Image (cartoon, rainbow, N blue to C red):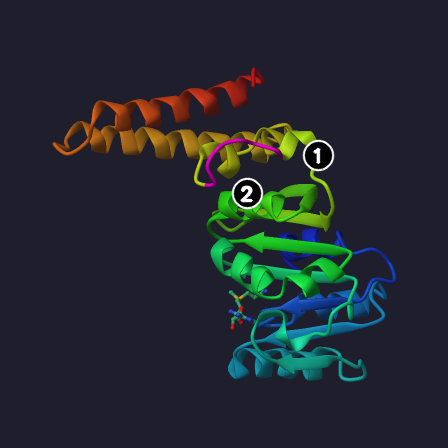
Amino acid sequence: MLTDRLKAMANQVEQGESVVDIGTDHGYLPMYLVKENISPKVIMADVSKGSLNKAKRNAKEFMPDAKFDFRLGNGLKVIRKGEVDTIIIAGMGGNLITEILGRDMGKAKSAKKLILQPRTAQGRLRAWLIKKGFNISEEQLVKEGKFICEIITATVGEPDEKYKLSEDMDSIKWEMPPWVAKLKTPLAKEFINSKIDRENRILKSMENSKVITESDIQAIKNNISYLEDLLSGEY
Ligand SMILES: C[S@@+](CC[C@H](N)C(=O)[O-])C[C@H]1O[C@@H](n2cnc3c(N)ncnc32)[C@H](O)[C@@H]1O
């Protein structure tokens, strides 16, 4: 029933942990956590009534005897501070995820663990987490269709030295960090290569532009050189 992406997130939840799934939509992940007896308590939450109804319909159809807690509302507003061990926020943009966490920092920091799966602005989310006093405990890459999805698990606490990058949050180093390259899986290699292809396409499009400066071109070349160093293991 679960896609590899949802399964990879479920694997981050430890036996006995209570969970809220913010933006649950179909509700498959919390349903799995209950079905497998991983979580004794799951809250399915969504800001959209239509989405929450989808979760309710699915729960009724596939797990009619299970008890779920459905909550309609924006971000972490639906939970109390310390109410759950784990907060899952998946399938949204990284900027929206930082907004949701940042608006209710006390609640975000009261959880033992955050499992985040940003669809965009992944680098910004990493930089934000480190700046705001979270540590990254694990990163995973998972293929879903043609997309390579990034799953970031974070906990409250002093970040490890390797996460303290001095670069701007839009830097390629936050977007494609050395610690993700060091996963050294075929998917990590494919991921880096896809970013090299993208940077090369940008470089090509710059050749025909009159408004691009030499330093713009150099910035892209630096990105490519950094990504190639990651691939060869020299970074
Ligand atoms: C693309 S779906 C992701 C569903 C599921 N989490 C997954 O990863 O497969 C995004 C869901 O997030 C919900 N959402 C968007 N902004 C939200 C917010 N501020 N608070 C709660 N839910 C939100 C949307 O209504 C939608 O159901």
Q: Is mark 1 within 8 Å of ligand 1?
A: no
- Is 146 covered by the magenta stretch? no
At numbered mark 2, what does the secondary structure look like: helix, strand or loop?
Answer: helix
Q: CA distance from mark 2 to mark 1?
A: 13 Å
- In the image, what residue occupies the spot 51% across and 42% down? 123
- In the image, what residue occupies the spot 86% across and 58% down? 15
Q: Quadrant of residue 87?
A: bottom right
The residue segment tinted magenta is 164-169
Q: Is residue 96 left or right of residue 203?
A: right
Q: Quadrant of ligand 1?
A: bottom right
Residue 185 % position (x, y): 63, 31
At numbered mark 1, what does the secondary structure look like: helix, strand or loop?
Answer: loop
- In the image, what residue occupies the spot 46% across and 22% down? 226
Residue 160's disc is 1
Q: Is residue 201 left or right of residue 44?
A: left
**Can I make out residue 36 in this image?**
yes
- Is 167 covered by the magenta stretch? yes
Closer to the chain start, of discs 2 and 1, is: 2
Instruction: State the residue in front, 116 or 112.
Output: 112
**Can I make out residue 183 in this image?**
no
Instruction: State the residue in front, 164 or 139.
Output: 164
Looking at numbered disc 1 in the image, what kind of residue is underneath it?
Answer: Asp
Looking at numbered disc 2 in the image, what kind of residue is underneath it?
Answer: Ala
**Residue hosting label 2:** 127
Residue 192 % position (x, y): 49, 31
Q: Is residue 202 left or right of residue 31?
A: left
What is the magenta segment's predominant secondary structure?
A: loop
The quadrant the N terminus occupies is bottom right
